[in-house]
Amino acid sequence: MYSFLDEHDVWFEVTEHQAVYNMQEVSKVNLPYPNADAKNIFVRDDKNRKYYLITVDGSHRVDLKKFSQDHGTRHLSFASETVLKDKLGLSPGSVTPFGLLNNKAHDVDLYLDKQFTKAPGIIGVHPNDNTATVWMKTKDLVNIIKQHGNQVVITDIF
């Protein structure tokens, strides 16, 4: 990921840390931009036809029923480890918007909480591995995902 970002002339910083698998573990890591750390959940609809990566501030909990109602989706639940690997090339604990670059079918939509676009406009996500956090401008992340061909919806998730 670092080479990819360098090749695309994207500003970023990296914070390396022990492997983290949930936000409780992340809270023990000294982060330079703690209010910009993202939590990512990968979900599917009840027919296994639509897939969504929902990215929110790490301190928030996503109510899937409310999200479904607010965004007009079918009933949502967490995707299996197998589907996560097949669609995003990721393992549990390493879910990140960068995984969308592995989504050749472009059939996973990113729903990004609007708060990441507010000043300072920085977001922290894993680089496809949960032993580091990449800090970058939210607009650059959005552009990378859109250029890859996945839909990005910036919205109020709460």
Image (cartoon, helix red, strand yellow):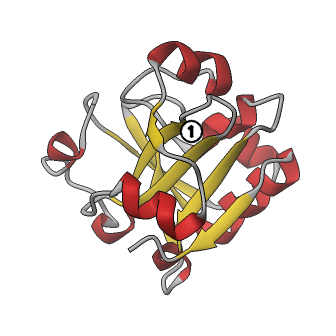
Report the front residue among 123 and 72: 72
The residue that disc 1 covers is 45
Q: Which residue corresponds to the image point at 66% horizontal and 58% vertical from the top-left?
A: 141
The quarter of the image holding the N terminus is top right
Q: Please, is residue 32 above or below residue 51 in the view?
A: below
Asked if residue 103 lies left or right of residue 126, the reply is: right
Residue 26, located in which quarter of the rendered image? top left
Q: Residue furthest bottom?
A: 119
Q: Which residue corresponds to the image point at 65% horizontal and 61% vertical from the top-left?
A: 11
Q: Is residue 4 visible?
A: yes
Mark 1 surroundings within 10 Å by alpha-carbon count, few (fewer than 14), some (14 through 19), many (20 or more): some
Asked if residue 12 lies left or right of residue 9, the reply is: left
The quarter of the image holding the C terminus is bottom left
Residue 10, located in which quarter of the rendered image? bottom right
| Marker count (numbered) | 1
Amino acid type indicated by mark 1: Asp
Q: Please, is residue 26 above or below residue 44 in the view?
A: below
Q: Please, is residue 80 above or below residue 39 in the view?
A: above
Q: Please, is residue 126 above or below residue 63 in the view?
A: above
Q: Is residue 126 visible?
A: no
Residue 71, located in which quarter of the rendered image? bottom right
Q: Which residue corresponds to the image point at 39% horizontal and 67% vertical from the top-left?
A: 36
Q: Which residue corresponds to the image point at 20% horizontal and 54% vertical from the top-left?
A: 30
